[in-house]
Amino acid sequence: MTVLTDRWNVNPRHFWLRGEKPEQPVAFDPALGIWNVYGYPEAVAVLGDPKTFSSDTTRLVAADLDPSLNDGVLFQMDPPAHRKLRNLVSHAFSPKIVAGLEPRISGLTAELLDEAAERGRLELVGDLAYPLPVIVIAELLGVPASDRDLFKGWVDRLFESTHQFSMAEEPQGLETHLEITKAMTGYLREHAVERRRRPREDLLSELVLAEVDGERLNDNQIVNFANILLMAGHITTTMLLGNTVLCLDAHPEWFAAVRADRSVLPAALEETLRYFSPFTAAARSTTAATELAGHTVPADQMIMVWVAAANRDGRQFPDPDVFDPSRDPNPHLGFGRGVHFCLGAPLARIEARIALEVLLERHPVLRTDPGDPPSFVPAPDMSGVERLPLLTS
Ligand code: HEM
């Protein structure tokens, strides 16, 4: 047990949150037909070798998938095609460009907190942590932020359709998944078509005008790529914000340290990414037989790299179950590692830092409500608060 799990009912499948250790760093699950990688050095080895551990997992789970649905999905691509597409958009998320968004992020945070104050209660996720990143990514892309209830409906349904990873049975919820993906890409397609006619100053227009090796991206690549930004751009950042507040609430000495000196905040965010990682697992597929932690893993196997569990590996982190923002360095895998390292990391870091600065400034008292406890996202590949009511007095 840890302070956090002592107090709250976190997702019971996320054993690392309770300080439990896997029996082995790599283990095959015969019931699900999946290799689970829990250890830190093993996770680093897998994420660092895209040739053997391909990100294209659809060939194993949905070989007959309509290829147009996967074209341009960056996190399913391998080098060299991956590098070309990533280069096209990486500048839009560079620390320098993202720093330019600071005033907008703090203005939006203030507006959202004003609205919450009018309602007379603060539920951190619904009032701030969810809308803020969605509005920011929608504005970057150039789709109306006012459609965010539509995005939320899709994303909530996607979560509901993800229960368990398994190679042993028909993938659960695949049909719902496809149906929602089609709805989202259909929506984005309309906006992309509009940008072809009338480009503006937004990321969607940039994608429409961009060229890879002298060729324009096709419509499928544009909408699929925009779609993953819209998705990746909000769920995880929402949880980073909520999980950080929960970690600070459970560790009052650190809450006081952050209040006394805001420059401690970035380290508290990094430690939350390690200790209560919002993104739990990255999927890979083996392209050839390989050795991993003394196991021979055949070709065409599904691998789940549990970065959240690896972040609690005592071989890498002393006292791994202690929340300690003073760790330096803190080489957590919360944003992944290697060629697929999170493209949005600079944006997520800045959004979370500014939102928390404004929140702490506004509310000298901020504490969880034992009478109205937080609830947690039930999906296996995401870990964090889904609802976080806070008392402000
Ligand atoms: C990739 C986590 C926020 C866009 C990843 C990966 C992780 C991750 C672990 C690697 C996946 C893999 O190796 O298969 C997170 C966390 C976030 C966050 C914890 C917030 C706290 C964002 C934001 C955006 C974003 C705000 C965009 C606006 C992406 C994209 C990729 C990615 C496009 C794929 C990169 C590639 O395949 O080259 N993220 N992410 N993420 N993330 Fe994030």
Image: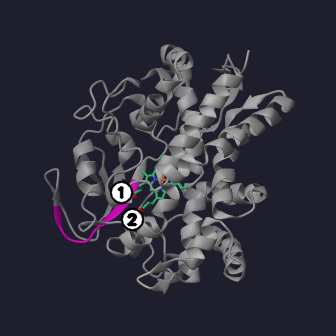
As drawn, is 214 to the left or to the right of 224? Answer: left
Looking at the image, tell me whether mark 1 or mark 2 is earlier in sequence order: 1
As drawn, is 113 to the left or to the right of 269? Answer: right
Mark 2 residue element: loop
What residue is shown at x 36% (from left), y 48% (from top)? 306
Which quarter of the rendered picture does the C terminus lie within?
Answer: top right
- Give the vertical position of 367 relative to 181 (above or below): above
Q: Is residue 332 magenta?
A: no
> Disc 1 marks which amino acid?
Ala
Q: Are marks 1 and 2 in contact (CB under 8 Å)?
A: yes
Residue 299 placement (x, y as % from top left): 23, 70
Q: Residues within 10 Å of mark 2 (few under 14, many from 20)?
A: few
State the colouring used for the structure image: one colour
Which residue position is annotated with label 2? Answer: 168
Q: Quarter of the image holding residue 113?
A: top right
Read off the magenta span: 282-290
As drawn, is 304 to the left or to the right of 94? Answer: left
- Circle on res. 31: 1
